[in-house]
Amino acid sequence: MSKAAIILAAGQGTRMKSALPKVLHKVAGLPLLGHVAAALKGAGVERIVVVTSAAGQEVRDYVRSLGAQSAIQLEQLGTGHAAASARDVLADFSGSLLIVNGDMPLITSDTIAECLKAQARTGLALLAFDAADPASYGRVLLRPDGFLNRIVEYKDASPTERSVTLCNAGCYAADAGKFFQWAQHLKNDNAQKEYYLTDIPGLARRDSVSCAVAVTDEISVLGVNSRAELAQAEGKFQARFRTRLLKDGVTMIAPETVFFAHDTVIENDVEIDPFVVFGPGVTVKSGARLRSHSHLEGASVAGAAIVGPFARLRPGAVIGEGAHIGNFVEVKNTVIEKGAKANHLTYLGDARVGAGANIGAGTITCNYDGFTKAMTEIGAGAFIGSDTALVAPVKIGDGAITAAGSVITQDVAADALALARGVQVPSDKTSLI
Ligand code: UD1
Ligand code: MG
């Protein structure tokens, strides 16, 4: 059966106290909304509609980048009203419809599949979890036969109902046509004067449809409503990611000090020393070693390469097989070919460093003249003396040498020596200056 999903993302997110819409806050470098959309796609959902507020242009721009559609909820009248706002956009759709809160970054494709499986039992299902601290989540009250009796929102609950620890996760599955029919009958006679999505099961029962409850783990359905919960979600995401990498054969002696992005790819037999941080877009191949206090983003590292300690790889850094990038070396938009070395205190930007080349300490590619960026080409086996300034655009031939302290403004031929620095005044003459 075809599958579509509505992601609810029009709420104010007032508890975040932020100018940025809640669902655009990031966990592991990806907006909350991106995590939810990725999990849905992984569960085979072909069509996603994100409900946004009228002011949510920033969210709609992001939605477009995800290849999803947007619907607008003009007034924030509650989660049920929000889901119903997607009706027109999905008018031509028939099949299974998932409705998911946009603030659940740890949800996985497997969790969504559990919800769909439960839906197949009766035609309607929701995800619930047993909360260690149920806080203000809606409480799930079951019938003796295990199906849902009703959900009671925290603000509407009696003290006895509040003592229930089974909570509503905010992920539902139903037949699309039926769901929109039920949604038309929602009422707002409750403590918050809102149209609650959680009242849908009660309306379904009038059509003799019971709501199945799939109980899932608490972490996967953690809702982010505040900065504290955002930090908590980040922590849980990182813990889950580290556990998976350790299982896949990555060595980390202090995994709790290493931070990954949502899309980090690390092969087995990579060694990651303590305090390494990954931004988005990094791939590290088997046999590489990342040493302490390095920061990598938009970079790839080949096998047997060593990066760090204290190295910074920025977008477009491609570190070849067996290459060494050492302490206080920054690499941006630069290919470091096989076995090349830049071991200390260097900036390599918009460059190619040929195989086996050696970059001395303090070398700088002067890639920006204040207006445009230019390339530096360093040939295979070249030796760049310490403290060389390479003023781009410039080419250093294969096997060429630049003398320490040179400012290189012209191309250097293969195997040539370039010496471009002031001549030292003999020490016995210094008293005359
Ligand atoms: C909701 C559930 C609660 C559940 C919890 C799980 C309802 C009534 N309550 O509460 O049972 O335990 O999620 O995290 O559904 N939104 C809109 N338009 C609105 C209101 C909200 O799009 O008018 C969106 C929000 O952007 C958010 C989602 O719906 O992504 C949930 O809203 P939120 O205010 O976080 O609901 P909770 O109070 O957490
Ligand atoms: Mg919430």
Image (cartoon, helix red, strand yellow):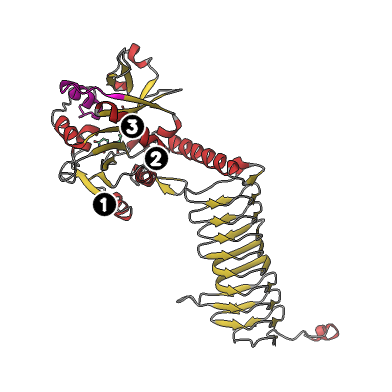
Seen in the picture, residue 419 relative to 73 is either above or below; the reply is below
Task: State which tag comes first along the sequence, 3 or 2.
Answer: 2
**Residue at image point 56% right, 42% down:** 242
Q: Amino acid at mark 1?
A: Gln
Image coordinates of residue 26 in percent, x first then y, are 42, 46
Task: State which tag comes first along the sequence, 1 or 3.
Answer: 1
Q: Does the rendering let one see residue 267?
A: yes
Q: Decide: few, some or many residues near mark 3? Use Cα within 10 Å; few <14, some 14-19, many ≥20.
A: some
Image coordinates of residue 159 in percent, x first then y, are 34, 12
Q: Which residues are magenta?
A: 192-212
Residue topped by disc 2:
109
Q: Quadrant of ligand 2?
A: top left
Image coordinates of residue 152 in percent, x first then y, are 28, 20
Residue topped by disc 3:
117
Quadrant location of the C terminus?
bottom right
Left or right of 379, for residue 422? right
- Under circle 3, the secondary element is helix
**Residue at image point 30% right, 19% down:** 147
Seen in the picture, residue 203 relative to 16 is either above or below; the reply is above
